[in-house]
Image: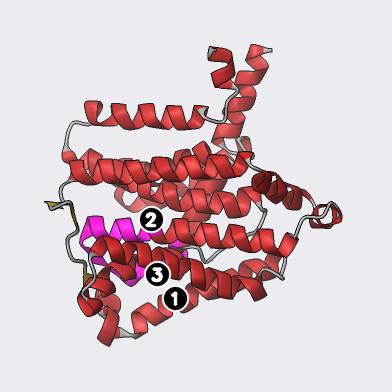
Amino acid sequence: MAKSLLNSRLLPLVVLAVIVAIVPLVAPSGFYLRVAALVWTFSLAAMGLTILMGYAGQVSLGHAGFLGIGAYSVALGPEYLGLHPLVSLVLGAALAGLIAWIVGKPILKLKGYYLAIATLGFGMIVSLVITGESDITGGPDGMKVARATLFGLKLSGASTWYWVTAGVMLVGAAIALNIGASPTGRALRALHDSEVAASATGIDVAAKKLNAFVLAAIYGAVAGGLIGLMNGLVTPDIAGFMNSIELVAMVIIGGLGSVFGAVVGAAFLVVLPQALTALHDYEQMVLGLLIMVFMIFLPAGIVPALRKLWTERAA
């Protein structure tokens, strides 16, 4: 039974659920729960990139643009349309998916560096629109987000948002794991290895790539919306270029194509800067050095490297 669980695709989900249950027991204050909630939200965004980059093999350097769409949806919806913040979150995810479908059709015909630059351009456009339309979005200063309520209860406080973000993250992880084990996931991995070979076996390469891009956009928009609701404020930084780079780094450091790796990578890049604040001026330098060390000695990512070590020891 235990051996079958170890080989099951449900193992990462079980491990994540256990971690989610343990963290509040060992967290000394609400600050740590808030940091953990940020880990869960960025993990969700990274899972979307895992589907796009890890499964389908398509590079995106503008993924933070979808976070910006989701974040500003929960701010603009209640402000200008009188919508409930959670309804705005759902509509923002749908809008991000629609935009990804429209934008993805032409740019996913590109490959390699050209695709990376095209997605980078998309992210820059979203960031510039958010910053430039100051009469609507508040410009560089951002805008406040209305507090959300659920069944009459106000969603506020580190503990509440910890459980909300953890629950959404677990749902997102379950969906990503099921996609990976489904015929769609196998088709995505096939075109990751060779689009020509995948096409020869009857896989609609263009449609599968577009599906992955839309799914990644929805994951990102939901994560952005949760960040906006949790912080009570959104700024254009959430759609910035550096956020896109950090999301890509999370996926690569944790392990490309690994859902659990997306969580590990997000934890690495969210928690470590908090731990390095004592270094002040050297914080970014040390963080960059650690990322370089991981890429040199664990090029496949943390989770695949640990899995390989476990398999070798078991053998």
Instruction: Kindly identify which residue carries mark 1.
Output: 126
Residue drawn 25% across the image and 59% down it? 229
Sequence-wise, the earlier of marks 3 and 1 is 3
Marks 2/1: CA distance? 16 Å
Q: Is residue 142 above or below residue 246?
A: below
Q: Which amino acid, mark 1?
A: Val
Q: Horizontal and vertical percent for residue 32?
A: 24, 39
2 and 1 marks in contact (CB < 8 Å): no
Residue drawn 35% across the image and 79% down it? 131
Q: Horizontal and vertical percent for residue 243?
A: 43, 61
Q: Residues within 10 Å of mark 2 (few under 14, many from 20)?
A: many
Q: Nearer the viewer, mark 3 or mark 1?
A: 3
Q: Horizontal and vertical percent for residue 55?
A: 64, 48
Closest to the observer: 105 or 107? 105
Q: Nearer the viewer, mark 2 or mark 1?
A: 2
The reply to whether residue 265 is in sight is no
Under circle 2, the secondary element is helix
Q: Which amino acid, mark 3?
A: Ile
Instruction: Kindly identify which residue carries mark 2.
Output: 223
Marks 3/1: CA distance? 8 Å
- Say which quarter of the image contains residue 160: top left
The reply to whether residue 310 is in sight is yes
Q: Which residues are magenta?
A: 222-243
| Quadrant in which the N terminus is drawn | top right
Residue drawn 29% across the image and 77% down it? 140
Q: Is residue 157 above or below residue 215?
A: above
